[in-house]
Amino acid sequence: MNNALKPEASVELERLIEFQLGSAEQCEAAFEALFRLHQRAVHGWILRIVRNPSAADELTIETFWRIYRARARFDPERGFEPWARRIATRTAIDWLRAQRPEYATASEFFADLPAPSRADPAVSAEMRRATEMAFARLRPALRVAATLAVIEERPHKEVAEALGISVTAVKLRVFRALRLLRKDLKNQGITP
Amino acid sequence: MKKQGTRYQGNEGTERVERLLRAALPPIGDASVPEHDLWPAMLRKLDERPARVPWFDWALMGALAALIAAFPAAIPVLLYYL
């Protein structure tokens, strides 16, 4: 049957099986197809976490490289996207761990990101900067949970799957992140 | 839709921290796309990675080299079993 006539899900499953079990040529062709299909979603997910466009490009490639290497452990029935998102999250956390906090929030990183159109005008630039810095000082595991659940407003279940933890653990991490952030801001003389 | 942020409000202070956080770091959302096609870079990465030799292969080679250095007379025996 021609691929164009098959339902999308069936073509995707076929690609996944070829990626995992096919010959070297089939595997590479399937990998390219999966890369082209999912690179945007993976890149977007990573960018949400690291908030740095050039690092997101690099980490997208690293994520797909890890996916390629780990293909033997992939379960096609569980779907490619959740698996890719989990590997992408781990890759992004590894990157965040390697960064110094002040580097991770350097303003030049945000130059290429969308303008803060939803920013609250009542919050001063100084307060924003202090919050950014305090947030960057949090452990990456807490920061990522808070970024995805609070800033990006992703569902807890999705965040839990991406982090490989339970929904309760996500809520706990977010709660701890917010509490530590509040404490840090208080220490700076800012009462949120 | 009810905002997820409100689920963490143990008190008003926490809610304010959430608001402050969103003001400081606005959401990126779904709008982001890579500036260029990343596939050529992916191909370069796939090509540049040399095949990794497992550590136990290196250990085996080391043990064999040590054996040959210590007992050169064992070379014909090893060749016999190859």
Image: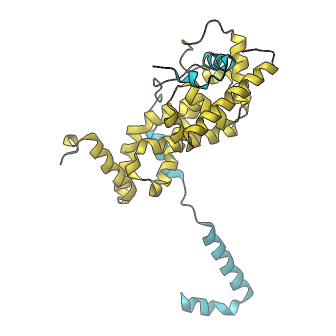
Chain colours: A yellow, B cyan
Residue at position x 48%, y 45% from top?
A64
The answer to whether residue A117 is left or right of residue A19 is right
Q: Indicate the position of residue A81 as horizontal and vertical percent values.
A: 43, 41
Which residue is farthest top? A122
Residue at position x 59%, y 66% from top?
B54
Q: Please tell me which residue lies in front, A142 or A133.
A: A142
Q: Please tell me which residue lies in front, A143 or A47.
A: A143
Residue at position x 45%, y 23% from top?
B31
The answer to whether residue B70 is left or right of residue A42 is right
Quadrant of the image occupied by residue A152: top right
Q: Indicate the position of residue B6 as horizontal and vertical percent values.
A: 57, 21
Q: In the displayed structure, would residue A150 be above or below residue B43?
A: above
Residue A102 seen in this snapshot = yes
Q: Indicate the position of residue A171 as horizontal and vertical percent values.
A: 60, 33
Q: How many numbered discs?
A: 0
Q: Please tell me which residue lies in front, A179 or A89.
A: A179
Q: Please tell me which residue lies in front, A44 or A23.
A: A44
Which residue is farthest front? B10
The answer to whether residue A78 is left or right of residue A170 is left
Quadrant of the image occupied by residue A6: top left
Residue A51 seen in this snapshot = no
Q: In the displayed structure, would residue B75 be above or below residue A19?
A: below
The answer to whether residue B13 is left or right of residue B27 is right
Q: Indicate the position of residue A18 as horizontal and vertical percent values.
A: 34, 54
Q: In the displayed structure, would residue B40 be above or below residue A180?
A: below
Q: Quadrant of the C terminus of chain A?
A: top right
Q: In the displayed structure, would residue A25 be above or below residue A132?
A: below
